[in-house]
Image (tube, rainbow, N blue to C red):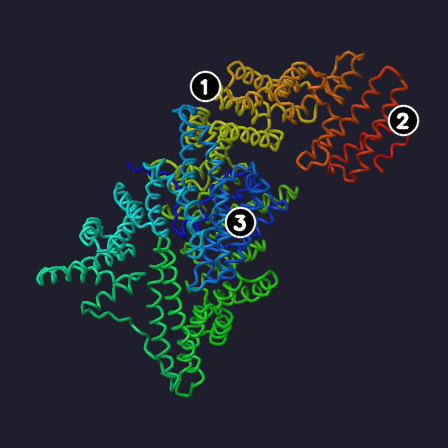
Amino acid sequence: MIHLTKMVPTGLLAIGLAFSASPLHVLGEEPAEMYLKQLRANRYFDMALIYLDRIEKGAPAPDEIRSAIGLERAQTYLEIAGTTRVPAVRDDNFLKAEASLRSFVDQQKDHPRVAEARMQLGKLLLTRAVVLLEGKELDDAQRKNARGSLDAAATVFDQIVEDLRGKLKAMQGNKIDSSDSAALALRERYRGEFLGANLLGGDVRERAGDTFPKDSPERVKRYDAALAKYKELAEKYSSLLPGAQAAFFIGRVQEKKGDVDAALTAYQNTLRQPDVEALRPAKTEAAARAVDILMSKSPPKTKEAIALAGSWMGGLRPNERSLPEWQVLRTALAKAYLASASDQKPADARKTKGTARALLVAATKVPGPHLGEARELLGNIGVEVTDEEAAPVEAPKSFAEALTACREMMDAAKMAALPIQVLKDEIARGGDNVDELKQQVVEAQADVDKRYEVASSMIQQGLALTSREDTQEAINQGRFSLAWIESQRERYWEAAVIGEFVARRFPTDALALQSGLVALNAYQSMLQAADETRQAALMRKIEPLAMFLSDQWPEDPNSASAANLLVQISMLDKRWDDAEKYLVKIPTDSPARAKFQNLLGQFLWNEYQQQIKADETEKAAGTLQRSMKQLEAGLKLVQRNDVDNTTLLSALLLSKAKLQNDDAKASLSILENETYGPLNRLKGDGALKAPGQGFVPDTYRTALQALVSQLKDGGDGGELLPKAKSMMSDLREALSSEPDSGKKLIGIYYSLAKDIRLQIENAKPNEKVKLIEAVKLFLGNVGDQSTDPATKHWVAQTFMEMGESAMGDVPPPATGQAKELLEAAAKQLKALLDDPSEDADAVRQIRFELATTSRMMGDYKGAINQLEQILKEKNSMIDAQVQAALSYQQWALSPGFNPKYVKNALNSAMSGARPDAKRKNTIWGWGKLAKLAQGKPAFEATFFDARYRIAECMYMTGQRSPEPSDKAKYAEKAEKVILGTLQLYPKLGGPEDVQRNDKLIRQAQQAQAKTPTGLP
């Protein structure tokens, strides 16, 4: 049995240009991933690149996207290369993608997406090599360049293989739990990628061998290296699809080496493989090659050839009748029949030739590399097949004659172009004849181009022959034809000038709008290949033309594309008023109206988040309302069968917006909507696929927030609490098949705890108590009924976050409602430690949270003991070091602390404590924290906080000392610490850091009997 393990197919399009299957990652506060996906899916590549640039410069985005900007940028370049018809643009974007991928792989070796980047880099190098080898006549330099790309690809695929080999070895046999579906799925994915990289490693070596002369030792060397790869797959993984495919590739390489007997054996082995759909193209080609080998024997083995090919041909399926590989087999089999007829009696020979003729006639009806030979064989038996030649065209004698001839030539060009898509589809399927098929595409395109060239020349001559007898309508038909032809010839400037002239000069003409749209499309095509300066100039042409077309023909559905473009341009430039104005020009019954309305709402949501981050509260409130208006309008226009990723994302964002607007009931209602609600459409019969891995968790997180808010507003707990329990169960089930599902669930719950804390902090004073009581009821119910550690951990985290929020700026110990919340958190955390997880990181996190909770409740000794235990295991856990230093500092300054130990405790906060066996402090203190954090951007906030805390500890040492002289002494030290930081970093850690340092230095100056001037 052949098992269909996931792997990378080996055809050119599948190998080289199918770059868009990148995994999606968790959504953060801003749906950056979905914006990128939608922009690329709609081919708004310029907008995608600009958006990535903005993220790189600081626009809000999840860390998963920000850390992989190089990979996302490479993905965009690759998709541009895969869609453009301009070779220079394609090559330029290939180079940009390669640079981005190499930079990502080299600089982020531990990133979780590095394996994906390596695979894309290998495919890119392979594709570039194949593109370099496309031409008919190649020189040595082209072959050398292609070989360099292939060798580089081989190195990349080998790296992938070795990396995955180690990972698979660690997951062998019973090393993973058979009930762990996520781990099993991960192992299966690794195995598919391992086999795919092995197969590609053989493919690139085989192609590299093809670039050498036939008598070159290097050619044989590369073929042998490819054989080694293929044979390993065939011998070790014969029951898997890649192993079965390798059997055919072995034959192909042996044939290239001249060992036809070994090749024949390999082809026969291929034909003995099970009849799996994915293997049929390879088996068909193997049959044809085997026939050629048998017929090349001396004497030819016709009976064996006919028996072998005839048996496989008998299984031809209806959907395979027009596939090129079957035409090659038909031709080879027909040749064998014709050879056998020469030794037969006349009656038998006629019958055999009739069989051959039927095979050849069928083969000649399908384009492909077999055509020449098939036609020649038919000619040998008296059946003539000739190419359809383009009729010669004479110079026109009048405009009318030229227009007629031009139209005929345009129709002929369109007919000649039809087989090109068929050939491209076959190329996409892959196979050994990809190069030949691509050559046929080149030849067919040349034929089409020639016909358009003649058509263009004909109509241009005709337009020079116009007379009074020719109507303006007919002349404009000629101009439209010329504009359209020039756009097909990629002479975009000519097409734009002619098309725009007709549209503006003759707006009442029947072809005016169509002419304008040809011009608009031509300008857009030029935009893709233009540099930044040229793009700006083209945009100055595009927008006025689009406005003209939209205003001139507002009711014509065809002008909607101009309005679409205006909306896109306005969104890209953040001209929201213009975007809204142009949006209403798109008919409400057009699918584009709902699409762009939703997209505009999403962009406005993004703008709202950036304004919130910049503390532009008033602006943000207005932008939120605009976003909601567009999202609501867009969702109303969507029909159930038209719901897509954009719709689902809009529903989620509108739900979030309603929640921000304090309308929890509407928020949940949107998520549960039968037409577009994610909670409804992502499960049950006909469930849609989630837009990304982070979408489902974000949806449930928002829904749970809405439930909590409804409890605050007096919602029915009897109805809402069971619904919350059901949602949490659905979330757990949705994540169950993913790797590290437990950690992801904990991460989601932690984010929800943060969300609830923020919700409480932003609540109005008269609502804050009610909200806390509602959350306590909700959490208590969930915690008491759940046996799931992740859920209990979330309950504890949320209690802790709420307790910290309730404390406000008041130092520990917590009192009143804050104390009750922290006690509830500590209870849950202690219960989790009593039944610890096997995951050491999870246990450390719980212990850390218990220590933090203990500190806030004033149990400083208990907090420090917990933190010491953590730091003995993982001394570099910065958050724990910070908590330990803060615990010593707050303990020293807490009410009731023995005054004679204050100085020692504050010194422990600054210099560290709890020495280990080697007399090194397990707890570092603020001094070492500042030293280690200095100059590291990721720990900038820790550095400035530690420096401030050192100064604060110095000042408080003097203030709490029984010696009067110590007050000025330690105040001077505190002042020097602050001034030392200021000298190196004049802006300190930002406005808030400046404010607290200024306040402290004034206090220190007063303690020295100085005039409190503050920071210099």
Q: Secondary structure at mark 3?
A: helix
Q: Which residue is mark 3?
A: 74
The residue type indicated by label 2 comes to Gln
Q: Quadrant of the C terminus?
A: top right
Give percent across and percent down for residue 54: 60, 49
- Residue at 54% in and 64% down: 543
Which amino acid, by three-letter code, is at mark 3?
A: Ala
Rate crowding at label 2 as few (under 14), some (14 to 19) or many (20 or more) other CA atoms within 10 Å. Answer: some
* Disc 1 residue crowd, few under 14, some 14–19, many 20+, Cα 10 Å: few
80 in relation to 542, above or below: above
- Look at the image and tell me whether residue 625 can be seen: no
C-alpha span from label 3 to label 1: 45 Å
User: For the point 73% across and 26% down, which residue is it?
Assistant: 928
CB atoms of marks 2 and 1 within 8 Å: no
Quote the CA–CA distance across marks 2 and 1.
59 Å
Q: Which residue is mark 1?
A: 787
Q: Is residue 904 left or right of residue 141?
A: right
Numbered disc 1: secondary structure:
loop
